[in-house]
Image (cartoon, rainbow, N blue to C red):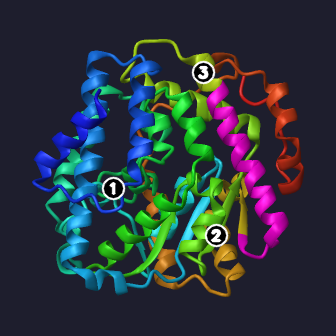
């Protein structure tokens, strides 16, 4: 791939050439270099990743143009968002899906995250034509990798993670999941996150301008950059999920290998084990440091085993932490979602530490301070 060529293609596709803040270029250069040098992409992978990069670039151009022509968007206030974070594979998706069911909340939808313009209208939100395109894309991905849905399921017309917006600044863990790009991941973890979160804030302002609501957001990525999150959203309600770190890292490596295998036939097991152990470790170390500085009151903690055992009780407890209560309407909607069981029909996700090149004892030792702080046992994990 060629960075200059991708930028030119995106400009041609969008019919626009004003990029606004060009802080995205550093991440784009590093990502493209890593895709070429490290990812071992197949022909399908080259085509798929090139199209994904172009989609992010063209949407960024359109967002920039829309805000320039509708400056009133900048007056929108993003107030008291609830932000679910924590290591991946710790129940963040389940908890976010439950908050999404609360009629008082407004989630970032999969179909709008990468196709933001024009911002959706509240009157036609449930029937927006972009939903059909999202379903078609999901069907295509299911055909390419039918096993992935058992590991991480998102409904085409449902909520998605904030990494889908942060990826348009090219400072996002999304790119690290879809391809083996360890040099990019190392750079991204230590890069200045402020441009990505400024863009994230801008997108939320634009999207809520015609379809308002109090945001319910989610991605483990946020746990890496909590100071940047609070700089943009100082009144955010932070919710952190916790689980046995050995199981978490093993599951995470398995997920990355399965998804990356869609676009590469190379065996990246060793790279993925190293990369994702480092990512998970960075999350826990930064969360511990953040909470040492700011205390624990800013964050409501949720243990995975408690969430699975009684999700409604956990949601009520989280809201109580922030001085709120669970409404009857929200509880009924959440119970309805749980009764639907969106994972029904999927083969269970099975994985072992040996499969993904991990030593469970070494992982348990590395995450010992985190496990002790939050009362989760660091076990030998599956297998």
For marks 3 and 2, the one nearer the N-term is 2
Contact (CB < 8 A) between labels 3 and 2? Answer: no
Alpha-carbon neighbours of circle 2 within 10 Å: few (<14), some, or many (≥20)? many
Q: Quadrant of residue 187?
A: top right
Q: Secondary structure at mark 3?
A: helix
Range drawn in magenta: 274-299
User: Can residue 120 be seen in this snapshot?
Assistant: no
Q: Which residue is mark 1?
A: 110
Q: Which residue is mark 2?
A: 238
Q: CA distance from mark 1 to mark 2?
A: 21 Å
Q: CA distance from mark 3 to mark 2?
A: 31 Å
For marks 1 and 2, the one nearer the N-term is 1
Picture disc at residue 271: 3
Alpha-carbon neighbours of circle 3 within 10 Å: few (<14), some, or many (≥20)? some
Q: Secondary structure at mark 1?
A: helix
For marks 1 and 3, the one nearer the N-term is 1
Q: CA distance from mark 1 to mark 3?
A: 29 Å
Q: Nearer the viewer, mark 3 or mark 2?
A: 3
Estimate the x, y position of residue 132 in percent, counting from the top left: 17, 53
Residue sitting nearer the eye, 151 or 52? 52
Residue at image position (16%, 40%) is: 9
Estimate the x, y position of residue 258 in percent, counting from the top left: 47, 26
């Amino acid at each position: 791939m060629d960075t200059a060529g991708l930028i030119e293609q995106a400009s041609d596709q969008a019919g626009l050439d004003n990029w606004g803040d060009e802080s995205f270029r550093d991440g784009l250069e590093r990502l493209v270099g890593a895709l070429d040098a490290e990812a071992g992409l197949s022909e399908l992978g080259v085509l798929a990743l090139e199209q994904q990069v172009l989609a992010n670039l063209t949407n960024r151009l359109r967002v920039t143009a829309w805000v320039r022509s509708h400056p009133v968007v900048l007056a929108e206030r993003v107030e008291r968002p609830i932000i679910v974070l924590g290591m991946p594979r710790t129940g963040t998706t389940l908890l976010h899906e439950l908050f999404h069911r609360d009629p008082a909340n407004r989630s970032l939808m999969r179909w709008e995250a990468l196709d933001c313009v024009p911002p959706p209208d509240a009157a036609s939100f449930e029937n927006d034509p972009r939903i059909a395109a999202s379903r078609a894309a999901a069907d295509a991905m299911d055909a390419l990798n039918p096993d992935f849905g058992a590991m991480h399921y998102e409904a085409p017309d449902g909520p998605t993670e904030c990494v889908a917006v942060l990826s348009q600044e090219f400072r996002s863990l999304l790119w690290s999941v879809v391809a083996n790009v360890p040099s990019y991941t190392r750079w991204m973890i230590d890069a200045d996150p402020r441009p990505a979160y400024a863009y994230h804030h801008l997108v939320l302002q634009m999207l809520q301008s015609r379809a308002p609501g109090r945001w319910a957001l989610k991605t483990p990525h946020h746990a890496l950059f909590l100071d940047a999150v609070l700089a943009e959203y100082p009144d955010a309600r932070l919710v952190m999920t916790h689980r046995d770190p050995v199981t978490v890292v093993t599951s995470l490596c398995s997920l990355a290998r399965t998804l990356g295998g869609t676009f590469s036939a190379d065996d990246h097991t060793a790279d993925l084990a190293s990369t994702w152990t480092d990512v998970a470790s960075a999350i826990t170390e930064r969360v511990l440091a953040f909470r040492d500085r700011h205390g624990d009151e800013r964050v409501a903690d949720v243990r995975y085993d408690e969430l699975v055992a009684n999700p409604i009780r956990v949601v009520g407890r989280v809201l109580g932490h922030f001085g709120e209560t669970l409404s009857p309407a929200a509880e009924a909607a959440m119970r309805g979602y749980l009764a639907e069981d969106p994972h029904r029909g999927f083969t269970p996700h099975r994985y072992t530490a040996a499969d993904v090149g991990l030593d469970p004892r070494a992982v348990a030792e590395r995450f010992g301070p985190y496990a002790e702080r939050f009362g989760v046992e660091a076990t030998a994990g599956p297998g």
